[in-house]
Image (cartoon, rainbow, N blue to C red):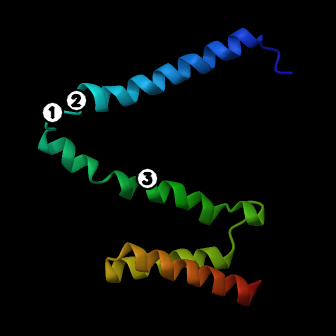
Amino acid sequence: MTGFPDSQIWLVIALLGLGTFLIRFSFLGLIGDRDMPEWVLRALRYTPVAVIPGLVAPLVLWPAATDGQPDPSRLVAAAVTLAVGGFTKNVLAAIASGAATLYLMLWLVG
């Protein structure tokens, strides 16, 4: 189907698996028992702040449910989530209010 022999596909899968293992092992196996420098720990604190918007933004701006067209329900829910999170500094309250707003807007707007 793909035009590639099975052996070549399995070789690529094995090499990707090995590469993934080596990347993770470099952190967990080689330096996992050592104290990390303060500047690395400071930079790692920002990882969730960088990853979560990267995961959520495409779902808000180009949702699959609307064939990639932004809709008011998701935009309002994102705005409410940001506002509640900014005011309360509570992640769970922000997520719950955003979810409630999304469901309410989908019920009202359709």
Say whether residue 48 is left or right of residue 79: left
The C terminus sits in image quarter: bottom right
Say whether residue 14 is left or right of residue 84: right
- Disc 3 marks a residue whose amino acid type is Val
- The residue under label 3 is 51
> Marks 1/2: CA distance?
5 Å
- The residue under label 1 is 34
- Disc 2 marks a residue whose amino acid type is Ile
Indicate which label's residue lies in the foreground, 1 or 3.
Answer: 1
Q: Which mark is residue 64?
A: none
Does residue 41 sit above or below 61 in this rendering? above
Say whether residue 34 is left or right of residue 32: left
- Label 3 CA crowd tier, 10 Å (few <14, some 14–19, many 20+): few
Which mark is first along the chain, 2 or 3? 2
Do tag 1 and tag 2 residues touch (Cβ < 8 Å)?
yes
Q: Which mark is residue 31?
A: 2
Q: Quadrant of residue 12?
A: top right
